[in-house]
Image: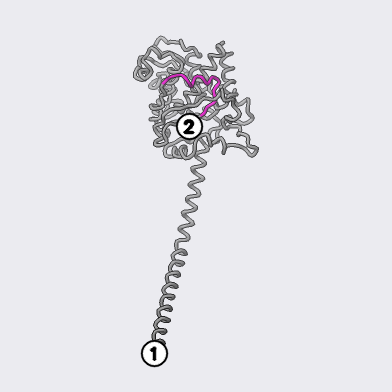
Amino acid sequence: MSKYQSKHQSKHLSYFLNKRSFSQLQAEDAKALFAFAIAPLHRTLNAILLVAVFLIVGLWLSGNGTNAGAFDMARILVPDEARLIVWQDGAGKPAENAPEAFSTVPSTDIASVIYDKAKSGFFGAKQQPIALLTPSVANTQVRPISHLSDQIPASKMDPQALDNNLMGSLRNQRAIADFFEKKYGLDRAKIEEYVSNTVFIAKEVNIDPVLLLAVISVESNFNPASKSSAGAEGLMQVMTAVHKDKYALYGGAADAVKPEVNIRVGAYILKYLIATSGSLRNGLKSYVGAANADSDGGYTEKVLAERNRLIELCQVRSPNKLTLNGSALRS
């Protein structure tokens, strides 16, 4: 190869390398310009994501108080039990309004609510640990009624009719049992069984157990054999003839007075009436059969007054007032 040819090739190689370096520089400049251009959008998306996370966590921590419509998704992000972990103070002790920590409850007092939740989707059956005075009620072979109660849109429910976790504490359950034992002269074992059944079923139906206890108190004075002249029977005084279809799930009307059956059917009916009538008060008025009447004979006020007495019994044990969405829980 001659000197001329070698020099000529060298020039071509140098030109090619310079041209390639210039192309790479252009590409890098384009990337940098693009990154600079989308930086505000990236920051905006990050901010939206952060706000969404805080919103979901806030709704999740608030529990049933905001159990409404699309926000139900917050409930399946993390198991319900995890709320206890987040809902603790700096000393690692449960907050006053948080449910009683299961680590402090003897295992013999803990039952599990296991039932199929339609809204659980691919998560399958939902299991929730719950402290009960008489945990054996959870072993009763009775079909859950959650397949019906879960069809009621949560957004239709009056928040005051939803479980506020007040009865998650065994201390509060004992206080309620003490109250009714003295008020009606009931057998201690029986009243603890009725309270436990009510708390257990309220968790299944997703309704306030204190409300159910107040209804039972006003309707039957906790006498399961009670029967009205109109045909209402059991603790919840359900009209057996009217609700034969629901009792069919439990073997027929012959078992209508069984506490575990009667409370289930009554709890579902009450929840349905509250959702369809638009409020807790209207639901109670419908439950007593006065939906189209001018007056319910003072029934609603009696139930709400009894419910407030039960709430006050539990609040005596805690210096903090029970609140619902920042307001005192009063109807």
Of 17 and 127, nearer the camera is: 17
The residue depicted at 38 percent of the width and 26 percent of the height is: 148
Mark 1, secondary structure of its residue: loop
- How far across and how far down the image is residue 117, in percent? 41, 31
Whether residue 130 is in magenta: the answer is yes
- How far across and how far down the image is residue 116, in percent? 41, 29
Residue type, label 2: Pro
- How far across and how far down the image is residue 326, in percent? 55, 36
- Vertical comparison of 222 with 8: above or below: above
Residue type, label 1: Ser
Quadrant containing the N terminus in the rendered view:
bottom left
Q: Which residues are magenta?
A: 129-142
The residue depicted at 41 percent of the width and 74 percent of the height is: 23
The residue depicted at 43 percent of the width and 10 percent of the height is: 227
* Residue 114 visible in the snapshot: yes
Numbered label tally: 2
Which label sits on residue 2? 1
The residue depicted at 59 percent of the width and 25 percent of the height is: 106
In terms of image quadrants, where is residue 21?
Answer: bottom left
* Residue 214 visible in the snapshot: no
What is the spatial separation of the Cα atoms under label 2 and label 1, in whole angstroms? Answer: 95 Å
Of 253 and 2, nearer the camera is: 2
Sequence-wise, which precedes: disc 2 or disc 1?
A: 1
- How far across and how far down the image is residue 160, in percent? 49, 29
Whether residue 266 is in magenta: the answer is no
Give the colour scheme shown.
Answer: one colour
Of 287 and 247, nearer the camera is: 247
Q: Which residue is mark 2?
A: 159
Of 147 and 177, nearer the camera is: 147
In terms of image quadrants, where is residue 293?
Answer: top left
